[in-house]
Amino acid sequence: MTMEEIDHQNLWAAEQRRRGILSLLGVQPLVARFNPPGARVAKQLECPPEAEVSPVASSIQHEDIPSGAQVSQGPPAQGQPSSKTAQQRSEGFGTSERVRNQSEPKPSALTLADTEAVAFQLLIVEAGSWLWLEQIEDSLIRREQLQLVEGMARAITQGAVNLKHHQFDWPLAEHAHLSKDAESAKQSVAGQLRRLARERQALGMILMGPACSEWVNVPPALTQLIIPSTLSMLEEPLLKREAWQVLKTHTPRS
C-alpha cells in the first residue's frame, strides 16, 4: 500500500470519526454535494473499498486505555452509570450507527462533485438600447465586426448609438482562486450583463451566433434576439438578410 493510499484512508477515518461524534452530540453532519459558484474547488474524498465504518463510541472506548490496564471493579459512584451500563450504551450506539450507515446511501464524493474547467471569450457591445453579444473564437476583435454592429444598431435605434465594447475573458485572471466550471462562468457573465444592462437601461440582448447562447442567460425582463454572428455575416453577406428579418421588427416607430 502506497503512502498516498494510507493518507487517504486516514482522512477517510477522520471524516467518519467527525460525523460519528456530531451524531453522538445530536448534530446532523452536513456534506457539500456540489461546487457552489465562486467557491474554491475542494479535493474529493472517495470511500476506500476496504474501509469499514467503525462506531465512534467503540473507538473512543479503546483509544486511551493501554493494553494490560485493569479497571477497578468497585461500586460505581452515586449518579454515575456502572461500567456494564456504559458498555451496553456503547454497544447500542455502535449497533444503531452501523444500521444508520448501512441504510443511508454513501455519496461518491464527500465534498464536491466533478467539475470541469471551461475557457472562452465574449465580445460585449453596448450600442443603442441593446447589448450585442458574440463569442470570440480566435481572440481577435476586428474593426469590421464593430462597424457592422454599429450599422445594425443605427437601424433599430432612434438617436445616438454611443457604441462601447468590452471583452469578457473566462476564467478571470484576477480571481485565480475561483472555480472555473461552466456554472460559475454563467454566474459571472450574468452579473456583468445585469450591471451593463442596468447602466444603459437596455431593452434587451442580441445574441450573435449560437456559441454565446451556452454562456448567456437573458433575464426574463429583457428581450432576447438571436442573429448570425458578425464573422459569419462578414464571410457570407447574404446572412445579413437573415439578421435584418429579426431586427426590423424592433425598429423605432416614427
Image: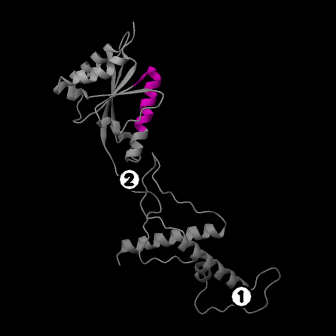
Q: Amino acid at mark 1?
A: Lys
Instruction: Write down the quadrant of residue 231 in the picture.
Output: top left
Give coordinates of residue 109: x percent, y percent.
44, 63
Query: Which is more N-terminal, label 1 or label 2?
Result: 1
Numbered range of the magenta stretch: 188-204
Instruction: Write down the quadrant of residue 7 in the picture.
Output: bottom left
The quadrant the C terminus occupies is: top left
> Viewer-proximal residue, 156 or 142?
156
Q: Give the residue pinned by disc 1.
A: 84
Q: Name the residue: 62% across, 66% down.
A: 22
Instruction: Write down the quadrant of residue 235 in the picture.
Output: top left
Q: Outermost residue toward the top?
A: 254
**Count of numbered marks:** 2
> Viewer-proximal residue, 56 or 182?
182
Give coordinates of residue 139: x percent, y percent.
24, 35
For disc 2, the neighbor class at 10 Å (few under 14, some 14 to 19, many from 20) is: some
Q: Are marks 2 and 1 in contact (CB under 8 Å)?
A: no
Give coordinates of residue 180: x percent, y percent.
37, 47
Q: Is residue 186 magenta?
A: no
Give coordinates of residue 204: x percent, y percent.
41, 24
Q: Name the residue: 66% across, 80% down.
A: 92
Element type where label 1 sits in the image: helix
For disc 1, the neighbor class at 10 Å (few under 14, some 14 to 19, many from 20) is: few
Q: Which mark is residue 115?
A: 2
Q: Name the residue: 48% across, 28% down.
A: 221
